Image: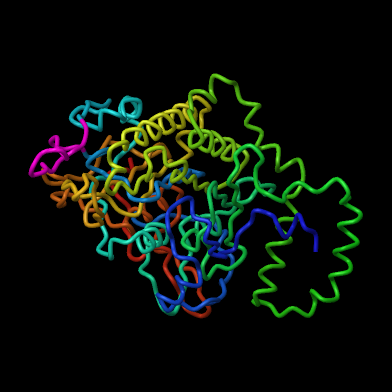
């Protein structure tokens, strides 16, 4: 087998514990602790038929850019600001770390460090009443927000990226349906969908996925001869086996390898002024995501838990809170640039931008001035995608601790994304012989559909 194929940045739920800085469980630990069984089942018939959402809620979006803020974004310090707190008082006063500002939507306020995004609030909706009732632990929250399902001992559920890539396929058959800009993790994987629901990943925006450029001494003829040598052995591989799934992955890597696919990663082709507008590494990842949308990729996840410019990333325990504003400013620069760029390119209405994070943060400060974990009330965000945006949706109490109006479950969040792409949230996949709806009784947010 070719070295470049073996090293290619394509993942089929390996659960590699290379984790952008958060101590997620590796796959072995994850499966041992949850009792999940590897190879829980095989995908049923292909679901590429024209999808239609239930209840008449059908959007026209074609792509998703999913921004993952690993660690747990503090909603009270970003998209659901409340009264000012004071971590240095004795006793400490619970509340927002920063002041708030008006947005483009009357009555909706964001954190003062989100001033660029605030000017675009009519193109987005902060969902302030997201909630789940898991143990507030990173691996469980990451898995739930990616899959919309509780961990099961009998089945490994696919991520929303794998589902959308499987149901809708790539817009352009010459690119993958699902790509990850960040490190692979089991929660982002295809679960029971198997290799065909996997993703191509990269961690370097400049060079693109590792292994998709052939070494100079590996000519197409040489590749063909090697494949011919493998054919007699390949014919003996049982369908559905791990080796069979690897063969599918290898075939996809071989198909994509070469300059036609790799040209989409040439960020230097973009004007300097635009690259500067996107800001640092996270912003460059968002710019690359826009290019991948234009290339025809259906679902792109962009990880932001990198560089940890505040010392801890979005996991703002203890001293991580002190420089959280630097992280929020970086998000503001990149998010506003992405929304503006998509709009100027004429593709904002068909590109849904989503922000995901595993849970929120309480208003109260911990002993060293940081914040703990809070899954019972937090904020996620949707922008563009042809939805009817409101700036904010849902009402929380005076400290963003309890939900007052319009609760939104994580399955509801997933259902809204599916419906925006014209996919019925009640549609069923097949794990072995078992039908599995793509959301766990999720209901799209009707207010977002015109």
Answer left or right for 136 relative to 3: left
Position of residue 118 relative to residue 165, above or below, is above
Name the residue located 88 percent from the left edge and 66 percent from the top edge: 228
Name the residue located 36 percent from the left edge and 42 percent from the top edge: 382
Residue numbers of the magenta segment: 81-98
289 and 427: which is toward the camera:
289
Residue 104 at x, y = what percent? 27, 25
Name the residue located 45 percent from the left edge and 77 percent from the top edge: 32
Position of residue 26 relative to residue 422, above or below, is below
Q: Is residue 80 one of those drawn in magenta?
A: no
138 and 233: which is toward the camera:
138
Q: Is residue 88 one of those drawn in magenta?
A: yes
Residue 438 at x, y = what percent? 43, 64
**Image quarter in which the C terminus is found:** top left
Residue 328 at x, y = what percent? 34, 35
Position of residue 300 relative to residue 269, above or below, is below
Residue 292 at x, y = what percent? 59, 40
399 and 25: which is toward the camera:
25
Magenta stretch: helix, strand or loop mostly: loop
Answer left or right for 356 relative to 40: left
């Amino acid at each position: 087998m070719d070295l470049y194929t073996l090293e290619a940045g394509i993942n089929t739920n390996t659960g590699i514990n290379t984790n952008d800085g958060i101590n997620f469980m590796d796959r072995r630990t994850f499966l041992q602790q949850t009792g999940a069984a590897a190879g829980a089942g095989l995908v049923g018939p292909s679901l590429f038929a024209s999808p239609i959402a239930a209840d008449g809620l059908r959007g026209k979006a074609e792509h998703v850019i999913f921004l993952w803020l690993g660690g747990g974004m503090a909603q009270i310090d970003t998209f659901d600001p409340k009264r000012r707190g004071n971590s240095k008082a004795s006793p400490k006063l619970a509340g927002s770390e920063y002041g708030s500002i008006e947005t483009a939507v009357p009555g909706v306020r964001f954190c003062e460090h989100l001033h660029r995004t605030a000017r675009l609030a009519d193109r987005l909706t902060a969902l302030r009443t997201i909630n789940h009732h898991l143990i507030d632990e990173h691996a469980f929250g990451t898995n739930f927000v990616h899959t919309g399902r509780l961990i099961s001992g009998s089945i490994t559920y696919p991520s929303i990226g794998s589902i959308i890539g499987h149901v809708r396929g790539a817009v352009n058959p010459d690119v993958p349906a699902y790509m990850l800009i960040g490190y692979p993790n089991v929660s982002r994987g295809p679960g029971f969908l198997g290799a065909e629901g996997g993703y191509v990943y990269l961690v370097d925006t400049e060079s693109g996925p590792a292994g998709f450029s052939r070494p100079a001494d590996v000519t197409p003829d040489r590749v063909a001869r090697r494949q011919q040598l493998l054919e007699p052995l390949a014919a003996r591989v049982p369908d559905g086996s791990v080796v069979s799934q690897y063969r599918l992955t290898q075939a996809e890597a071989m198909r994509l390898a070469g300059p036609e696919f790799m040209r989409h990663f040439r960020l230097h082709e973009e004007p300097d002024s635009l690259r500067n507008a996107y800001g640092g590494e996270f912003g460059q990842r968002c710019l690359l995501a826009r290019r991948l949308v234009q290339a025809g990729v259906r679902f792109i996840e962009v990880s932001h838990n990198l560089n940890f410019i505040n010392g801890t990333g979005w996991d703002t325990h203890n001293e991580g809170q002190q420089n959280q504003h630097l992280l929020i400013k970086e998000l503001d620069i990149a998010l506003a640039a992405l929304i503006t760029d998509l709009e100027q390119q004429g593709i904002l209405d068909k590109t849904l931008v989503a922000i995901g994070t595993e849970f929120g943060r309480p208003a109260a400060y911990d002993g060293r001035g940081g914040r703990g974990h809070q899954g019972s009330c937090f904020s996620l965000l949707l922008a563009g995608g042809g939805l009817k945006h409101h700036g904010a949706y849902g009402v929380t109490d005076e400290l963003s601790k309890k939900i007052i109006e319009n609760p939104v479950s994580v399955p509801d969040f997933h259902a809204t994304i599916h419906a925006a792409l014209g996919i019925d949230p009640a549609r069923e996949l097949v794990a072995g012989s078992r039908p599995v709806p793509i959301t766990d009784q999720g209901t799209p947010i009707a207010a977002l559909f015109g």
